[in-house]
Amino acid sequence: RAMRLTSLKGVFVGSGSEGLQQPEVVTEILSLAGKAPTELNVLYIGTPTYEKAQSRENQTKLLAAAGCSVTHLKTTLAGDCTAVEMEEACAAANIIVVSGGNTLYGIDRWRATGLDRQLKAAGERGALLCGGSAGAICWFDGGHSDSGDPDTYISSAAAPAPAGADEATTFAEGGVAAQWDYVRCPGLGFLPGLCCPHFDKTQSNGVLRAHDFDEMMLRHPGERGVCIDHFAALIVDGARYRVLSLPGKPGSVLGGAFSEARAGLPGVWVKEVAGGEVKTWLAPADGSLDELLREPTAVVEDRRLATIRAANPSPKEL
């Protein structure tokens, strides 16, 4: 809780590259930033994608096209930046965009380098905190993550990212499911709660995230879950929030009920464990952030993280 921000502005999207390439998302970011685009400095942090150029292009091109100045702070490997460069980049940023990708690698690197403290200082100063997928999870206490998927490991960094494609994998109907599990990944803790992005999607392991997240909630009953559909966004403006449902995109909200077939509209759901059962309700379109989120009664680290860290280690020095 020492990392909590008392007042925060942010745009947290259910998907990384696909979400940040939606004009409606960028419009919300620019509106919340409160300045003309030509006056805005955007800091892009691509640690979760190991600085892939295509992912950076996907997630910043609309902001650049609007007139924003975009800077890329590299932190993936030891020696990528100095402490002074890191501090100056965060201090100059009006908007910070964190990429999708491997959340656990990103969080571990930021803690090792002190970037976590610089990000907090930027948020306290009023910088707008943004991102999708890993870039949404990272601002919360933790989240439902695919960081255990070997396709998200640094060993995959040499593989080119397809233009426009999202960082999260998609299960091919009729295909063979990959052997990996979703895990609870820690975040920076600026906001309370467990964030589940891509809530309505099934990734390469063949498991619908919405179903798996129920199991995760039962293992972590002290926390409240905030579930963001692939084409939805949670927009936070101080004490208030609102939900962005991207028009013309598939989602899980159908007549107020959950549609596994994504036959409805994109939305945001809330989950909590009571009496040993997972309770789920649809987040109102807007409201008080205190009513949407709550402080945890207990936080339990996922025991599988040590195995993932050993398989995908990050440098422990700047």
Image (cartoon, helix red, strand yellow):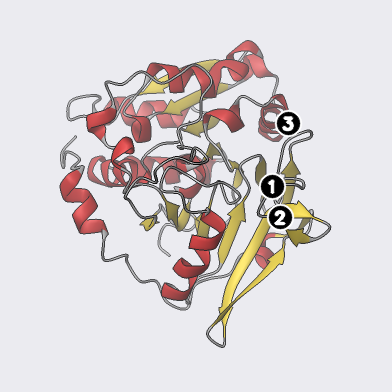
Residue at x 45% of width, y 23% of height: 55
Q: Secondary structure at mark 3?
A: helix
Mark 3 = which residue?
Answer: 31
Mark 2 = which residue?
Answer: 259
Amino acid type of the residue tagged 1 in the rendering: Arg
Q: Secondary structure at mark 2?
A: loop
Marks 2 and 1 sit apart, C-alpha to C-alpha, by 5 Å
Q: Is residue 301 left or right of residue 141?
A: left
| Quadrant assignment, res 143 | bottom left
| Quadrant assignment, res 129 | top right
Give residue 172's position: percent from left, percent from top.
Answer: 49, 37
Q: Are marks 3 and 1 in contact (CB under 8 Å)?
A: no
Residue 128 appears in the figure: yes
Amino acid type of the residue tagged 2 in the rendering: Ser
Marks 3 and 1 sit apart, C-alpha to C-alpha, by 29 Å
Q: Are marks 2 and 1 in contact (CB under 8 Å)?
A: yes
Q: Residues within 10 Å of mark 3 (few under 14, many from 20)?
A: few
Q: Are marks 2 and 3 in contact (CB under 8 Å)?
A: no
| Quadrant assignment, res 9 | top right
Q: Nearer the viewer, mark 2 or mark 3?
A: 2
Marks 2 and 3 sit apart, C-alpha to C-alpha, by 31 Å
Residue at x 58% of width, y 14% of height: 64
Residue 193 appears in the figure: no
